[in-house]
Image (cartoon, rainbow, N blue to C red):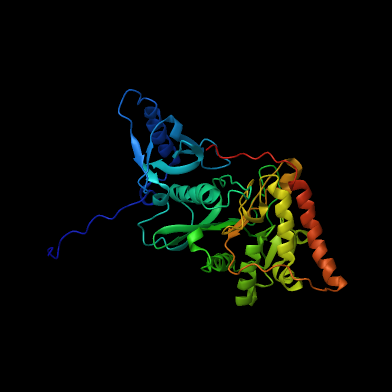
Amino acid sequence: MEPADAPEAPAHFYPVDILEDNPQVALESSVAYYSTVGEQAGTSPKYYSLPTGEKVKLEDASVCFLPMYRDEPKCKILVLVKPQDRKTALAVYLNRSWWSIEEIMKTSDPSREGLIQVQSFGERIVLFILNCVIFGRLERNLDDGMFFLPHSATEHAKILWRNGDAIGFYTIKMKGSLCGRNTSECYMLPVLDTAFVRRKHRREGLGMKMLHDFCQTFETEDALGISCPISTAMYQVCRKFLLACPEEQDRLWEVEAPGSWCQRVNIWLKIQLEPSLSYRKVTRRATSEEADGCHRESVQDDEPRSSDNGEMNKDSHSREAAEKIKENKDCIIIEDEFTPQPPVKESLNQKTQDVQWDAKRRSDKADIVENKPAKQLRPSF
């Protein structure tokens, strides 16, 4: 038996707990290490052992830099990729050591529990991995034609932590912030822009949790937005949330940036008018947008978006004329809390149809612009 005053075993720390809050220091360390990788010719090869037991040789073919932010290309992290599939990241080099993707997602800090705002450099890395690696490559349907770019360096985001693991996130376009880099327009209301929940944690009410947190964060605002278009899964989450919290029914709007009154539709009204509206609208859009490689039904920010695979909404940008609309729509991704029902044929009066088709005309206008080939910058896996 150990003596009563025996010291406790040291806790196992993870990158988010120990990483210096200085991107430049991290980059310099990675560059110094990378310069040694190509000098291993004639020496005993070095390998990295994955949690699965697989070993990957540390060489030029399996190591590369990825930009962390879409608006700061000089800020990069060093990743280990599959030599036969350089689009799949396996580990990240941080603090003079390789860390597996799952280790990057962990914390030993018990205070990180629930939805925590992203502030440190280490948390930015967690957000990047959740967005571009886990959803972008590991937990999405590779046949859905979607891909993702990193968030901006100043993206307002919250990571969802549970029992020491990062299991999801959502991002917000703040009221008064610029709608995009090539416009002077600003958001007229806070907008829930992108969201994602890891596959093994879906159907646990976490979409509801994010919506509730979003509404509570801006409890003094009269109107809150969810970026357009909203996926079928997200409509189901909204329906359940608004039934449970009727006081929010007048506050939540589906919006196109910047969110003026002519660019928003009350979500609860749309749900009441025709429950199958979102199903038909999203299905139609998916067909045309998949051709462009950007499935807006569910994705991300400023240029790409997420899908119905467990996410909510993300943002997608195009060229000059399209940026006004696209840069402000981050498709959202969160597994539906319900099983989406097939469309129901209903006989609505002419007034109801006018309201619906008015909303559709605005959406179709966005489709015409967004279905033009957009210059997308893919991460350089």
The part of the image, by quadrant, that contains residue 338 is bottom right
Report the front residue among 6 and 60: 60
Q: Is residue 364 above or below residue 202?
A: above
Which residue lies most toward the right here?
350
Q: Is residue 209 left or right of residue 24?
A: right
Residue 159 seen in the figure: no
Residue at image point 53% right, 47% down: 137
Q: Is residue 174 above or below residue 65?
A: below
**Residue 365 point in image, percent of width and height:** 79, 52
Report the front residue among 288 and 250: 288
Q: Is residue 318 above or below residue 161?
A: above
Residue at image point 56% right, 47% down: 151
**Residue 347 point in image, percent of width and height:** 83, 74
**Residue 21 point in image, percent of width and height:** 41, 45
**Residue 239 point in image, percent of width and height:** 65, 71
Q: Is residue 129 left or right of residue 71?
A: left
